[in-house]
Amino acid sequence: MTPVAALSVTPTAIDGLLVVALDVRADNRGWFKENWQRRKMVDLGVPDFGPVQNNVSFNTAAGATRGIHAEPWDKFVSLARGRIFGAWVDLRPGPGFGTCVTLELGPETAVFVPRGVGNAFQTLEDETAYSYLVNDHWSLAAKDSYTFVNLADETLAIAWPIPLAQAELSDADRAHPRLADVVPMPAAKTLVVGAGGQLGQALSAAWPHATAVTRAELDLADPASVAAFDFAPYGVVVNAAAYTAVDAAETPEGRKDAWAANVTGVAALVGAAREHRCTLVHVSSDYVFDGTQAEHTEDEPFSPLGVYGQTKAAGDALVATLPAHYILRTSWVIGAGKNFVATMASLADRGISPGVVDDQYGRLTFTSDIARAVDHLLTSGAPYGTYNVSGAGEVMSWADIATAVFVARGRSATDVTPVSTATYGEGKTLAPRPQHSALALAKLEATGFVPGLATDQLKAYLETVSP
């Protein structure tokens, strides 16, 4: 074995398959290596994949051959003794399907194998021992989700150092299908929590392939419901559920309900995402700010005015502890169901002339745009973190928006009476609202996302609202 001077990571022809040259220190007594060093390896590009199990395989004689198996987890493979010839085949759907990489390994080399990439090993020396870290616990049930391809597949044409006719193989490995007959390992599933809400409905429409669950199926306010739910099949969890009754949250019962759903429930969701290595997408609110800034950036410190905003801020802080997370901060959300625009359209259609607050400012955010932003962040490889998302264009008051709705419905602009927040709140029990809710969009736009103009989306939305 030739000692390696420094740790390094090299990509291969298979996306995500990485070869790691290990720093092996040798002397007259033998050698020592850091077989897995999270900080150094992650800094060099190995995913922070969170291993939970270490397996060791020992082969008595050269020629023992295993594979080709693709498993539903990531693994980090290295040798403690001997040498092997390794072959990896991409068995994930997409343009890389069938790509093959081969390499000879000794104790000085390790390989990071992503989920869905098949691996096979042939021992080249007697008494070879290799180990591998995996980021899920093995079970008989998990083996049902393996994908296999035959070691002797003609299209792969793997040049095994010891011909397979002379190698030691299991009957199962000999019987695996040829590449042409392999069904690619599907990607981990996407889960949408809160499918009954405005955003949940938009996400369900945009992602017919996703599993969308309502509160009846997964209730974040009920710890037992979260504990009983099986998150194992999912690679992405989108939390579109929340307690959003801003005024009711100021009552004794409402306060408890808001904290149960927006904080305790989110904490349980974060725990599940951490355990199952899910990317968690969480939808937040401008209510985490006091509204004193005319436009809010993602790094503005929390300053919530009321209970709802306090619970959303606490939920954001919990989600941010996950390495793989996106927090989408929104404002003035409009989608299917009950909302401000639908209410104003109904008032206009019924001949009612309302007073509407004119000293709170922001931009409408349509659920179709939020769904589009979520999809963009997940598919573009954008850095994890917090992103503002709303409609683009001019900042408007609630009264401005109501007036636009009335005019679109054939009513006069003067049928909407602008009133102050103080006047509107006389005789009512209302939670405090941010005066300024507009969100800066530069960070999201820098990822390549183009928000729709709020005014254009408002016109299109009103066409879907029946008189």
Image (spheres, helix red, strand yellow):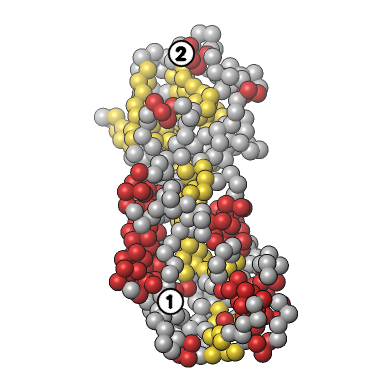
Q: Indicate the position of residue 46 as horizontal and vertical percent values.
A: 45, 45
Q: Indicate the position of residue 96 as horizontal and vertical percent values.
A: 63, 36
Q: In this view of the protein, which residue sits in the foreground, 201 or 415? A: 415
Question: Residue at 41% of width from left, 75% of height from top?
Answer: 247
Please name the amino acid that badge 1 sits on: Phe
- Could you tell me if residue 178 is visible in this image? yes
In the picture, the disc for residue 181 is: none
Using the rendered view, name the quadrant where residue 406 is placed: bottom right
Q: Indicate the position of residue 429 as horizontal and vertical percent values.
A: 39, 81
Please name the amino acid that badge 2 sits on: Ser
Q: In this view of the protein, which residue sits in the foreground, 240 or 9? A: 240
Asked whether disc 2 touches disc 1, contact meaning CB atoms under 8 Å apart, the reply is no
Q: In this view of the protein, which residue sits in the foreground, 107 or 26? A: 107
In the picture, the disc for residue 289 is: 1
Residue 178 shown left or right of residue 256 in the figure = right
Q: Which of the image's four quarters has the C terminus?
A: bottom right
| Label 2 packing within 10 angstroms: few (<14), some (14-19), many (20+) | few
Sooner in the amino-acid sequence: mark 2 or mark 1: 2
Using the rendered view, name the quadrant where residue 336 is placed: bottom right
Q: Residue most toward the top?
A: 166
Q: Indicate the position of residue 248 as horizontal and vertical percent values.
A: 39, 72
Q: Which of the image's four quarters has the N terminus?
A: top left
Question: Residue at 58% of width from left, 44% of height from top?
Answer: 209
The residue that mark 2 highlights is 170
